[in-house]
Amino acid sequence: MRNLLVWVVMQDEGGRVLLGRRDGSAYGHGLWGLPGGGVERGEGLPEAAAREVWEEMGLTLDPAGLSLLGVRRYEVDGAQGTDFLFRARFWQGEPQPLHKTSEVAWFAPDALPPDALPWIAPLLDAHLRRGARLTEQLRDVREARVIA
């Protein structure tokens, strides 16, 4: 299976990252994750990112205000795909759990909950802390190989 996905890193003034606990999702049910998901046919990447945040957390993002934080290629457990990681600095509304999300909370990027999706911590470390633009995660999602 091949996937084209978008994820959004939203940080508050203290640098904490907004995560949602996945609920009713075929992937990662019960785990904390970034808002995001699949890109629909004919949909632009920033528009998909804004739509996913709206559906999952009820926040309004301007797609033009999103910046590309990085790209991740992965190949794990028979699935392969490409993730586009966007950063949102501005949004409207207060986060609330909506579609396939049971709760939302802010976490320091270096102190994520133990039940977060395992690929998030190395991805945030590579893209937020080290400034990577392109990473790969092959076989083990607990490590992110920086390409550029």
Image (cartoon, grey):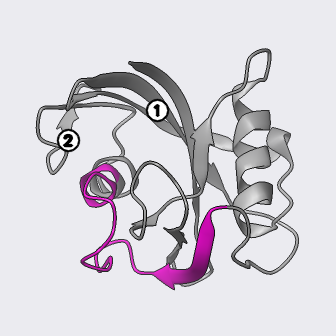
- Percent position (x, y) of residue 124? 35, 56
Closer to the chain start, of discs 2 and 1, is 1
Q: Magenta residues? A: 100-123
Instruction: Please name the residue that numbered disc 1 is placed on.
Output: 83
| Secondary structure found at label 1 | strand
Crowding at dot 2, Cα within 10 Å, few <14 / some 14-19 / many 20+, comes out as: many
| Nearest the eye: 109 or 52 | 52
**Residue 5 vs residue 132: left or right?**
right
Q: Amino acid at mark 2?
A: Ala
| Nearest the eye: 104 or 110 | 104
Residue pictured at 51% horizontal, 59% vertical: 34
Residue pictured at 80% horizontal, 81% vertical: 94
Residue pictured at 20% horizontal, 41% vertical: 144
- Percent position (x, y) of residue 57? 72, 68
Q: Quadrant of residue 68?
A: top right
- Percent position (x, y) of residue 49? 69, 43
Q: Quadrant of residue 6?
A: top right
What quarter of the picture does the N terminus occupy? top left
In magenta stretch: residue 75: no
| Secondary structure found at label 2 | loop
Does residue 1 appear in the picture of this structure? yes
- Percent position (x, y) of residue 84? 52, 33
Q: Work out whether 77 lies above or below 106.
A: above
Q: Quadrant of residue 134?
A: top left
What is the CA distance from the residue labelled 2 to the residue labelled 1?
13 Å
Q: Which mark is residue 19?
A: none
Q: Amino acid at mark 1?
A: Asp
What quarter of the picture does the C terminus occupy? top left
Does residue 86 appear in the picture of this structure? no
Q: Work out whether 51 lies above or below 118.
A: above
Q: Which mark is residue 144?
A: 2
